[in-house]
Amino acid sequence: MKIGVLMGGTSSEREISLETGKAIVSSLKRLKHSPSELVWNELELITKSQELMEFEVVFIAYHGTLGEDGHVQSVLDMLGVPYTGSGPLTSAIGMNKIISRKLFTSEGIAVPPGMELHRWECPSFEVIDQSIRDSFCYPVVVKPSSQGSTVGINVIESSGFLEGGIVEAFKYDDDILIEKFIPGREFTISFLGDQILPVVEIIPSHGIYDYTCKYTKGGSRYICPAEIDNAVREKLQYMGRKAFKAIGCSGYGRADFRFDGENCYCLEVNTLPGMTELSLVPMAARAKGIDFDQLIDTILNLAHGKRKT
């Protein structure tokens, strides 16, 4: 097939997107397809729409805002070009941590206790601090609502660091989320069509699984399949699938959880997970006997939508 691979973009995750895109292009060549590297900013999808319509499928390798939040998916839908991953509405919900956690809660999926803040109606730091103390206590995690790869995220140990964490998060979004930090272990569950892939445990080299731990060799250890009791594994997979369906995901994706030894708390669902050599979906697939090329081929076959004639 003639396939366009969209990568790069203008988000803070551009470099990771390029790594993902190049890995996908190499795989598609091994699979005897004809891929084209489309290192475009997101607005070029509009100005180059005729070029896009020449592809049988577009493989989206963008990460971060615009590429993951439904904008690109909406353009491709309007053009009638099939693409990998979920549709526009699901992508928008998955990217917005405030909205997605409300959907998780409505479906009985536990999330960390938290509060949302909006730039244009944000109370004083003193009021926020008191709300934290009254509701769930420190340490807390402060993060932008609509960023990926833990960009702008900080663990705040005490009130003295709260203002700095909030100011940092507001650099990336007008809406931010403050959640209780859940001590314990971090797990991720990947999905490929109807398949639930093996659970991966993430052990970051420091504190939380941040940008450095994700994309630096040796920044984290991964155990796949995770060494957990069957009851915990089944619970994580059940809750992960439930979260995946709650926001309407299709194709492939990943749900991230914290486990405190008793309860599983859903952090988010990633609708366009990375495909670099350190990425978690390929790792989970390998543990199930699915190599990288088989994974890419399956994602391609699960492409969203049918081309209009």
Image (tube, grey):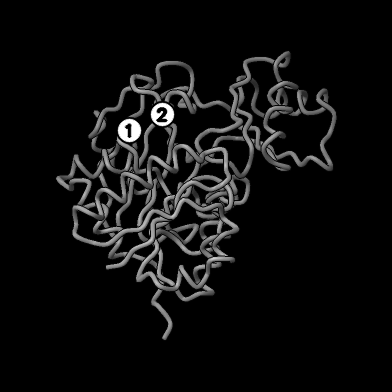
Q: Residue furthest bottom?
A: 309
Q: For this rendering, which residue is in front, 57 or 194?
A: 57
Residue 240 on image: x %, y %: 39, 47
Within 10 Å of disc 2 (Cα), the crowding (few <14, some 14-19, many 20+) is some
**Rendering coords of residue 79 (x, y %):** 50, 74
Decide which of tag 1 and tag 2 comes sooner along the chain.
Answer: 2
Q: Nearer the viewer, residue 302 or 248?
A: 302
Q: Is residue 306 left or right of residue 285?
A: right
Q: Which residue is mark 1?
A: 278
Relative height, residue 283 to residue 186 (above, below)? below
Q: Quadrant of residue 42?
A: bottom right
Q: Is residue 297 above or below residue 151?
A: below
Query: Which mark, residue 215?
Result: 2
On screen, 91 above or below 160? below
Q: Position of residue 271 (x, y in %)?
A: 45, 52
Residue placed at 53% from the left, 33% from the top? 150
